Image (cartoon, grey):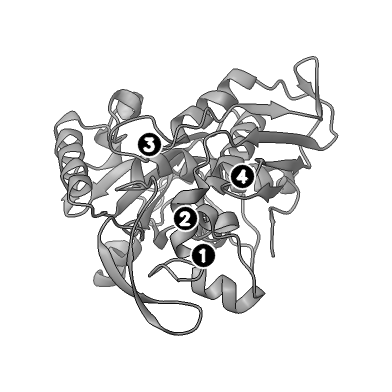
């Protein structure tokens, strides 16, 4: 299995949802970087379960413990090892899927590929793994402090935040439990998620991410284009079904005369339908993209499925699951973007 991400600034992770711990090793981090451990923990707190009524009620403190690579508050240049202990497992909630396959989960494909799987909470396939990525991303943010990364919930189901990001106050993202920087739309989103939760169902949505103060020149032609690596990073996140940057799919409806970003004398552009990336290389304008998340596959309703012997069986969801993954995905999107930007920044040197 592929457990590493990045080229120079790398993260390699381990652990399962219901194992003793999860964790990882961050490689390639320059020495002498002051690491704010509290800031790293704050990023984990944004992702952790049990933080509100519209997310999974699994109670994990998600306290990170650094084991190496940081001394007297600064990176040493050595590998940065860390662990996050699992303390609130309820593995019995998953015994009913030991020999059956949950619809739209990885149970079937993992069993067919490896012949054996950890069915407790999905094992390695669980989104619990993303806590490791948030640690890596939090460190990456401190390697590139001048680059600002802001992600927020931009839709839940058919509820969309219609305002362009330029009209939003990013300081309000954390003001509500759905992480939408518009109070009126946020309240509608919260009500919708809570209603879906009470019906034993789930719902999807989108996260928009804006990256500012990116220098010109990040990204490597031909197969390591900046947007390609951002797309890979986002599509690696559990439950992601789509990625678009700049004008995205809307750009397919336009004419070239409408879509072209005309230059100013200083090299900036009058519009930014390119999304801050041209030819796979950052052009100094804001990078913005949107990530689509499917409804969580585990629902608290009866569904028909198959067992390992091919028999049709009925399954009813159990355990503690997010009715909508989007609010907790916001810091994950930021973290993966930070890993990509830190990697390209170091490569550019």
Residue 310 appears in the figure: yes
Between label 3 and label 4, give the one nearer the viewer: 3
Quick check: 247 above or below 340? Answer: below
Task: Give the labeled residue for mark 2.
Answer: 94
Of the 4 image quadrants, the one containing the C terminus is top right
Quadrant of residue 297 in the image?
bottom left
- Write the residue at 54% across / 54% down: 120
In the picture as drawn, the residue positioned furthest to the top comes out as 72
- Label 2 vs label 3: CA separation? 16 Å
Q: Which residue is mark 1?
A: 98
Q: Point out the residue furthest to the bottom here.
A: 310
Q: Is residue 266 visible?
A: no
Disc 2 or 4, which lies upstream in sequence? 2
- Name the N-terminal-most of marks 2 and 3: 3
Query: Going by the image, does 47 lie left or right of 169?
Result: right
Where is residue 298? Give x, y as percent: 35, 58
Badge 2: residue crowd in 10 Å (few <14, some 14–19, many ≥20): some
Foreground: 103 or 254?
A: 103
- Going from N to C along the chain, the mark reached first, 3 or 1, is 3
Q: Is residue 133 above or below residue 75?
A: below
| Element carrying mark 3 | loop
Instruction: Tell me if residue 170 comes above or below residue 271 in the rendering.
Output: above
Q: Earlier in the sequence, mark 1 or mark 4?
A: 1
**Residues tagged 1 and 2 counted as in contact (Cβ below 8 A):** yes
Question: Which numbered disc, 2 or 4, marks the residue closer to the eye?
Answer: 2
């Amino acid at each position: 299995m592929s457990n590493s991400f990045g080229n120079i600034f790398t993260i390699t992770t381990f652990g399962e949802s219901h194992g003793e711990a999860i964790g990882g090793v961050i490689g390639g981090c320059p020495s002498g970087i002051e690491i704010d451990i509290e800031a790293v923990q704050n990023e984990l707190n944004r992702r952790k379960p049990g933080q509100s009524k519209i997310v999974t009620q699994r109670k994990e403190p998600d306290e990170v413990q650094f084991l190496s690579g940081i001394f007297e508050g600064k990176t040493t240049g050595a590998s940065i090892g860390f662990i996050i202990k699992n303390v609130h497992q309820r593995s019995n909630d998953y015994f009913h899927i030991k020999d059956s396959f949950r619809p739209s989960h990885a149970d079937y494909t993992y069993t067919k590929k490896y012949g054996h799987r950890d069915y407790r909470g999905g094992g390695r396939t669980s989104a619990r793994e993303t806590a490791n990525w948030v640690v890596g991303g939090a460190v990456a943010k401190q390697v590139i402090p001048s680059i600002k990364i802001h992600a927020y919930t931009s839709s839940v189901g058919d509820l969309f935040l219609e305002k362009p990001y330029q009209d939003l106050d990013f300081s309000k993202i954390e003001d509500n439990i759905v992480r939408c920087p518009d109070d009126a739309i946020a309240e509608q989103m919260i009500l919708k998620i809570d209603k879906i939760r009470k019906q034993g169902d789930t719902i999807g949505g989108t996260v928009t991410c804006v990256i500012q103060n990116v220098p010109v020149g990040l990204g490597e032609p031909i197969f390591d284009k900046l947007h390609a690596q951002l797309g890979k990073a986002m599509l690696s996140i559990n439950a992601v079904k789509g990625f678009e940057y700049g004008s995205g799919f809307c750009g397919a409806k336009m004419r070239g005369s409408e879509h072209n970003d005309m230059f100013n004398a200083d090299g900036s552009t009058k519009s930014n339908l390119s999304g801050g990336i041209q030819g796979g290389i950052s052009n100094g304008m804001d990078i913005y993209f949107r990530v689509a998340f499917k409804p969580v596959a585990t629902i608290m309703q009866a569904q028909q499925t198959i067992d390992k012997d091919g028999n049709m069986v009925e399954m009813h969801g159990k355990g503690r699951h997010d009715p909508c993954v989007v609010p907790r995905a916001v810091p994950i999107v930021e973290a993966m973007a930070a890993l990509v930007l830190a990697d390209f920044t170091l490569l550019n040197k």
